[in-house]
Amino acid sequence: MKIIRRDQIERILPSLDLMPEIEQAFQAYSKGRAVVPPVGELLLDRGEVHIKYGYLKQQQHYVIKIASGFYEDQAMKQMSSNGMMLLFSQKSGQAVCALLDEGLLTNVRTAVAGAIAAKYLAPERVDKIGMVGAGTQARLQLSYLKPVTSCRKVMVWGTSREELESYRLDMEQEGFDIKSTMDIRELQQQCRLIVTTTPSKTPLLLSDYLQKGTHITAVGSDTPDKQELDPKILGKADLVVADSMEQCLLRGEIHQAIKAGLLEKHQMIELGHVISGQTLGRESMDQITVADLTGVAVQDLAIAEAVYKASQA
């Protein structure tokens, strides 16, 4: 079994074009070519552990991924992630590769999925990107949006001035013009492409401040009890897109909106169908669109295989 450690993965990642790989994985999932059992989950006092696993039919490998997030400071809502991905042969069950990524690959594949959602659903003209949260995922989301939009003006919302200042300094080095705010209304009023990246259990974005033409990519709510969006936002939306309809019925923003009686299953579509063109994405500048990304094992398979193959070169 090959073992690839985080430092090796960090050297490999810049050479990979992950967006096509993960787009293909979403399409295969929506076409019924994937086997993805329900998420395994441990919810602890100071953190959570997610176990995701699956495979694509008639392909080489299956993946088992363990990813955790533990609070370093509950008052600040800062989390430390960890984990690993394991690749096995579909033919023999032999362990092929252990990727000791410490949560990095989960963070990256989530950011790539966010960029994919924006590619198909964000308005063509984006004057300012809104980032809700100022942690690791908020940094990665912005970095991976670079090929999707030419916009470099950003408003970031957070709960700590120290956290926001750290974010500003880091992302300005990547060429972004960062403005910070602790007023979520200001962000909603100025931004038409918004990404939410927090572990909040109460809504942060409110329906009352929702502007026409807004696209929201929600990546923080990946358990049944997390929630970053007012459910009325999904009720108002012209298009609600799930990475996995099956998963989003049980967790994430779609789950919360259905529970509130503001959304029904037939009103949402899957991201893989939008990518393939089977269903339409954004059709006008005025549409309100929401992508609920709870994280699907096919993303883990795609990124683990990409890193493994690159390590063999």
Image (cartoon, helix red, strand yellow):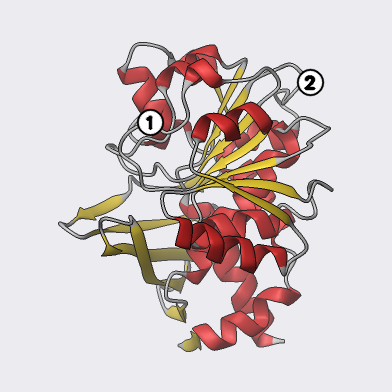
Q: Which residue is mark 2?
A: 285
Which amino acid type is shown beneath numbered disc 1?
A: Pro
x, y percent for residue 261: 34, 11
**Which structural element holds mark 2?**
loop
Q: Is residue 235 above or below residue 274?
A: above
Using residue 74 as the reference point, say whether residue 196 is left or right of it. right
Q: Earlier in the sequence, mark 2 or mark 1?
A: 1
Tell me what residue is drawn at x 42 percent, y 75 percent: 102
Tell me what residue is drawn at x 57 percent, y 20 percent: 210
Q: Is residue 102 above or below residue 11?
A: above
Q: Is residue 306 above or below residue 249?
A: below
x, y percent for residue 143: 68, 60
Which mark is drawn over residue 115? none
Q: CA distance from mark 2 to mark 1?
A: 25 Å
Q: Sort mark 1 into few (<14), some (14-19) or many (20+) by Cα contacts within 10 Å.
A: some
User: Viewer-proximal residue, 262 or 194?
Assistant: 194
Tell me what residue is drawn at x 45 percent, y 64 percent: 63
User: Viewer-proximal residue, 128 or 114?
Assistant: 128
x, y percent for residue 308: 59, 78
User: Viewer-proximal residue, 184 or 48?
Assistant: 184
